Image: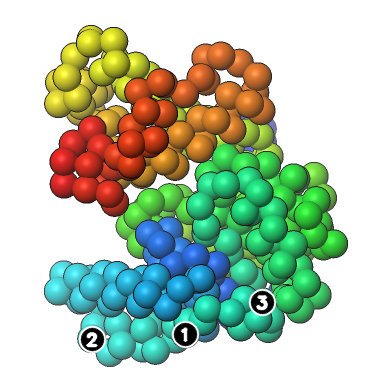
């Protein structure tokens, strides 16, 4: 019984007592992850500022949120008034300066290490000293991200699952320098967003992608080596393993460029060839076949 309790506390730590209350959330990036994070934060009563490099990206992000809220309304999960109220709490900007007074900022930009590092360095110089800087990275070290700021104790990983409004899990990744207050406030925020936060330590790929991406990568090797066609591989995993979605359909949905970026991090940081990205994946990304978002991947859309 003691052993089970100890395991339970490692996975789901006791509900933290934090002195910090997050009222405002900044989101850097308005793509599928960024607009999803903005949506759940706004629906939970937080004031949200979503920032991106172009107005057209922000307009597309807000449009996606609006359609998502309409869909929830049509299913009776929220009222028209709640949807309108949530949308009114989201403001947008092409300037990072707009995030200066946010209590917590979540970065949700492409999985490119150098871009993450420069973004956090910029956020560190803009955001108020008490602000928490969180990364939605799928695989990049939070320790390394934190090292590009002067507030390493207030940097943390907050890895949401895709699609954010639907998936309940958030991996809360604690770096070596992350303070107790930062962890507690972030864990509490995830619960306020009606998510299930799980403590994960800072290792390449964390838990979700260290397990998931090698499986997707192996499915790609099966295609490349002629083991079976994509439809057959997906059918085997759906009907034989009870997966809700086949691995190649899922890879297309995630984005093949994102899959490749994560596999490269796993391969480099774990220094093990079992994480070598499938050459077919590399070729498809080079050819611009990124999955659903580009209109073509293992399937056509």
Q: Residue furthest right?
A: 150
Residue 184 visible to an observer of this rendering: no
Which numbered mark, 3 or 2, is in the foreground of this view?
Answer: 3
Q: Which mark is residue 31?
A: none
Disc 2: CA contacts within 10 A as few (<14), some (14-19) or many (>=20): some
Look at 66% across and 34% down and name the residue there: 203
Look at 80% across and 51% down and name the residue there: 147
Examine the rendered structure and indicate whether residue 283 appears above or below residue 90: above
Examine the rendered structure and indicate whether residue 250 appears above or below residue 221: below
Look at 57% across and 40% down and name the residue there: 139
Q: Position of residue 94 (x, y in %)?
A: 52, 78
Going from N to C along the chain, the mark reached first, 3 or 2, is: 2
Q: Nearer the viewer, residue 11 or 136?
A: 136
Going from N to C along the chain, the mark reached first, 2 or 1, is: 2
Which numbered mark, 3 or 1, is in the foreground of this view?
Answer: 1
Q: Nearer the viewer, residue 135 or 178?
A: 135
Q: Position of residue 54 (x, y in %)?
A: 46, 73
Q: Position of residue 18 (x, y in %)?
A: 72, 68
Mark 2 touches mark 1? (CB < 8 Å): no
Residue 100 visible to an observer of this rendering: yes
Query: Quarter of the image holding residue 17?
Result: bottom right
Residue ID for mark 3: 103
Q: Quadrant of the N terminus?
A: top right
Look at 44% across and 67% down and name the residue there: 30
Residue ID for mark 1: 91
**Secondary structure beneath label 3:** loop
């Amino acid at each position: 019984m003691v052993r089970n309790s100890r395991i339970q506390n490692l996975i789901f730590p006791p509900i933290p007592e934090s002195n910090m209350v997050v009222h405002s959330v900044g989101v850097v990036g308005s793509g599928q992850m960024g607009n999803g994070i903005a949506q759940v934060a706004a629906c939970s009563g937080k004031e949200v500022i979503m920032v991106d490099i172009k107005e057209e990206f922000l307009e597309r992000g807000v449009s996606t949120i609006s359609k998502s809220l309409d869909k929830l309304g049509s299913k009776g999960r929220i009222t028209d008034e709640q949807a309108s109220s949530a949308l009114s709490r989201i403001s947008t900007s092409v300037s990072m300066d707009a995030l200066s007074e946010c209590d917590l900022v979540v970065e949700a930009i492409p999985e490119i290490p150098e871009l993450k590092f420069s973004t956090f360095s910029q956020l560190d110089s803009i955001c108020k000293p008490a602000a928490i800087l969180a990364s939605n990275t799928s695989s990049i070290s939070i320790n390394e991200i934190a090292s590009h700021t002067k507030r390493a104790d207030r940097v943390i990983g907050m890895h949401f699952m895709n699609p954010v409004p639907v998936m309940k899990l958030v991996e809360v990744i604690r770096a070596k320098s992350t303070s107790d207050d930062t962890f507690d406030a972030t864990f509490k925020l995830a619960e306020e967003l009606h998510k299930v936060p799980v403590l994960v330590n800072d290792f390449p790929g964390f838990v979700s992608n260290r397990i998931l991406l090698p499986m997707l990568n192996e499915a790609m090797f099966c295609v490349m080596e002629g083991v079976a066609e994509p439809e057959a591989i997906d059918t085997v995993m759906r009907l034989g393993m009870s997966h809700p979605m086949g691995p190649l359909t899922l890879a297309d949905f995630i984005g093949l460029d994102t899959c490749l970026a994560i596999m490269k991090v796993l391969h480099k940081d774990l220094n093990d060839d079992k994480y070598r990205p499938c050459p077919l994946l590399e070729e498809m990304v080079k050819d611009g076949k990124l999955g659903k978002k580009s209109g073509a991947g293992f399937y056509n859309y």
